[in-house]
Image (cartoon, helix red, strand yellow):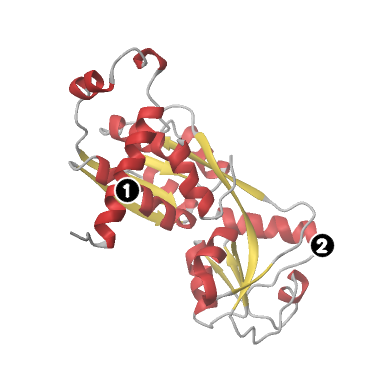
Amino acid sequence: MKLPFKKLSALAAAAILTVSLTSCAPASDTTSTPAAASATAPELSGTLSVFAAASLKKTFTDLATAFEAAHPKVKVSLSFDGSSTLVTQIIQGARADVFASADTKNMTKLSDAKMAAGEPLDFATNFLTLVVPPTNPANIASFADAAKAGTKLVICAPQVPCGAAALSDATNAGLTLAPVSEELNVTSVLGKVTSGEADAGLVYVTDAKSAGQAVTEVPLKLATPTVNKYPIVAVEGSKQQELAQAFIALVTAPQGQKVLQDAGFGTP
């Protein structure tokens, strides 16, 4: 019988995750047989709330699907937005079990608020590129072109990791940006470009890759591009610490890293 593609994907993801979790088992467990471990390991269940940077939407959605396939009694609830928005929501009381930030600055806010359960782990890196609509109506061929007066350039707001990186890259290039709009997450910047509302936008290379033919990429060609590190941690006070740690283990394991790197993220 030929299985539907989605079913095949779920089964493959479950197999990948099983290998991942096995490879992450503590050294003290290596003397146990797989059968014995399986017989004694409690089955994970419940709902895991993951707050993650907007640039992680595709990869974390894929990883959450794999996690649920391996743990049928687990539901992963995903919230994507700018990292500064998410950490503010968590500190103000929003229910989150895991926080994945697009920079260390916003992760530090969580740690300073005594709401990080342990030391955050860096799991990926990313940097910016310039994207324009496929027809490139403003004839933008360089970072300098995007900074010219009259160009409808859209970037992230300064408090968002992609906005801080945009200003840092502009400084490195000796440019002053005059954006027509500053968005609260990178997804909104990409949307302005793909809808034709902007002549150009600064987004992560991973966003440019995922957009495919909806945009044309114009590399910044910087000698020292700003590289954002992505840390992840369980949230202090969460009642799903076991689930949170299992999900973090998936993200940082080789199989999780492959999903991220296939999407264009760099190694931490």
Identify which residue, 43 or 12, lies in the foreground.
Answer: 12
Identity of the residue furthest to the front in this view: 1
At 30% across and 30% down in the image, what residue appears? Answer: 241
Mark 1, secondary structure of its residue:
helix
Q: Which mark is residue 12?
A: 1
| 212 shown above or below 20 | below
Picture layout, residue 214 above or below residue 165 = below
Which label was assigned to residue 265?
none
User: How far apart are the alpha carbons under marks 1 and 2?
Assistant: 48 Å
Residue drawn at 34 percent across, 12 percent down: 31
Q: Amino acid at mark 1?
A: Ala
Tell me if residue 155 can be seen.
Answer: yes
* Left or right of 202 on screen, residue 52: left
Q: What's under tag 2, amino acid-wise? A: Gly
The percent position of residue 178, horizontal first and vertical second, equals 69, 72
Is residue 235 something one can see in this rendering? no
User: On the image, numbered disc 2 is attached to which residue?
Assistant: 174
Q: Are marks 1 and 2 in contact (CB under 8 Å)?
A: no
In the visual, does 140 lie left or right of 53?
Answer: right
Q: Earlier in the sequence, mark 1 or mark 2?
A: 1
